[in-house]
Image (cartoon, coloured by chain):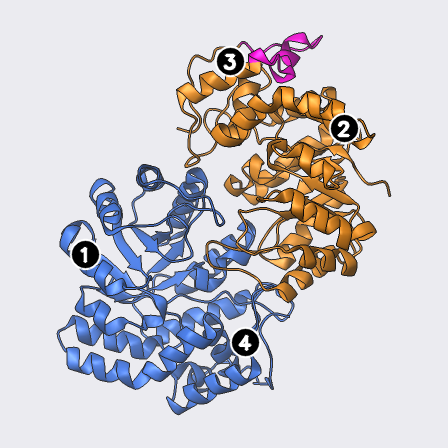
Chain colours: A blue, B orange
Amino acid sequence: MTTIEGIVPVAPTAFTDGEELDLEGQQRIVDFLVDAEVDGICILANYSEQFSLTDEERHQVLTATLERAADRLPICVTTSHYSTKIAARRCRQAQELGASLVMLMPPFFGASMKVDEQGVVEYFKRVADGLEIPVMIQDAPMSTTPMTVDLMARIAREVPQVQYAKIEVPRTADKLRGLAEIAGQDLPGLFDGEEAVTLIPDFDAGARGTMTSSMIPDVLGTAARAHLRGDRAHAVEIWEEMLPLIQFENRQCGLLATKVLMKEGGILSSERTRAPFPAIHPTTRRQLVELAQRKDAFILRWAGERTGRTHIPNTTAAAGGSA
Amino acid sequence: MTTIEGIVPVAPTAFTDGEELDLEGQQRIVDFLVDAEVDGICILANYSEQFSLTDEERHQVLTATLERAADRLPICVTTSHYSTKIAARRCRQAQELGASLVMLMPPFFGASMKVDEQGVVEYFKRVADGLEIPVMIQDAPMSTTPMTVDLMARIAREVPQVQYAKIEVPRTADKLRGLAEIAGQDLPGLFDGEEAVTLIPDFDAGARGTMTSSMIPDVLGTAARAHLRGDRAHAVEIWEEMLPLIQFENRQCGLLATKVLMKEGGILSSERTRAPFPAIHPTTRRQLVELAQRKDAFILRWAGERTGRTHIPNTTAAAGGSA
């Protein structure tokens, strides 16, 4: 089995202005990402507002995405759930429907329900049991269950399906370096996350892939692949050129940046998130769009340039996020 | 509309040893609680392991419970969800199916996704919009979104459906006293939680009800109603007699205590929780059962005493919780 490398951006979940799923928009996101030449797409992640979906909606996003991807590229499905049984079932269903990879945070709930190390190991063992596609551990600050380098290396050693880890915590590079040293070939798929805001030090530390948002996946993919083939100078050049936009997304916008720019560029007809997710401030929104225009972002051009596509008129004035 | 007072215990969610729903067991829990003369039953709470259920399983527990309750007593349904839209839909469905009350934590997700005060007010406004049954705010340490007395009083003032608040945080009595003073008749249904471990100070502070586990609801209901009719001395006497058991549940067992004793008493055929929820230590389990026997707990006697009921043989030796 070949390890996926390069860039696997998170696709946002597309909503209408009424906060219902927009499955047509969801499929346009797939087309955009294929044209951006990404190495895979991750769906139902936290940046996809998975915490705002019902089980039935999860299923709809999953099937719409896999149908549209149609073997053009691998799809990574986030299957996190506190219950081992439910997480395992979600993984099996994703596999049956055609996913190439599943990603899970360790089990946790709310502010207080952490799981101890032995419990986390057993969780991943049961979740992966009988699974044929690989598993990515997601190490994110949102989880109240902490993941150490030693624990992740142990899981990779004891659970063969665990081939990937995505690290998106403070000092990600240190953790990636530790995993490369300790886990070695038990864990070939080292990824960073967090909008690629630490891409260069992370790839220097051994990352083989980055799981960013879907804002500038074309450029970040080029940077990641340059680094992977040993052309670090080119990777640095590309990344530093985009850093103002990456940093603005990371510090000012979060998951809203991609939605705003997809609305501006005509990929989505609404940039809505589900309440109570906070809306973007109109000033922040304007600054984001200006910065993305200045950097000539593909996300703003794609829909207009695409032949044979019905253009969605851009009627946005100063729309916010969720109502 | 009369405010529910007294005791509204949380029903556990019954699982088989294979961690599947046990809906027959779920309905026996209703019968037990009716015979324990409780004033209502709360389902799908955190003590019901709601964090370990799919949407479909939530629906099954809800319909099985409401069908068996059959207007014998009010059912309170926990409908918490981060998404306002999904929480609102859950409330409407609970109402349509016959629930008397819904309970929600403020929106939150994981360790980091808190919602600000204005966001929380808007959440409860939208959730309650058009709802005919009352709403209980749940103020629990599991939520990363903090609830102050002022915020809860404001919600009760601005959202007429919000008639209840259940407080289960450190210094619950202070918070209840504050709510009684500030919210007054906007919030007549003041409840405590946490296994009634602070029942007397909480009722002294203005609580009109307690939301305990289902371990000794008969006794705690008697204590609560004694306090409500002004017989504080009797309430104290009953509560202090049971305090060793209450305290053992609160500090050593959590939600497992009810399940263990229901298994021992033949109400449930399995005390299973869903992994990775930690199992009870065999020593702790033995001490709990001995203590409950010494206190002659109704939960241990009910199934055997009940006429016309098929007794489930008690075959437990030293079973644990989740595998």
Is disc 2 on the same chain as disc 4?
Answer: no
Residue A34: image location, x then y, percent: 36, 72
Residue B300 lies within the magenta run: yes
Amino acid type, mark 3 = Glu
Task: Report, in whole angstroms, how far the alpha carbon at label 3 lies from the one at label 4.
Answer: 57 Å
Quarter assignment of residue B96: top right
Is disc 1 on the same chain as disc 4?
Answer: yes
Label 4 SS: loop
Amino acid type, mark 1 = Gly
| Disc sitting over residue A280 in the figure | 4
> What residue did someone put label 2 on?
B232
* Quarter occupied by the C terminus of chain B: top left
- Residue at image position (54%, 47%) is B141
The chain containing the residue under callout 4 comes to A
Q: Please determine whether, in this image, residue B129 is positioned above or below residue A315.
A: above
Task: Report, in whole angstroms, how far the alpha carbon at label 4 lies from the one at label 1.
Answer: 37 Å
**Could you tell me if the residues under marks 2 and 1 are in contact, i.e. CB atoms within 8 Å?**
no
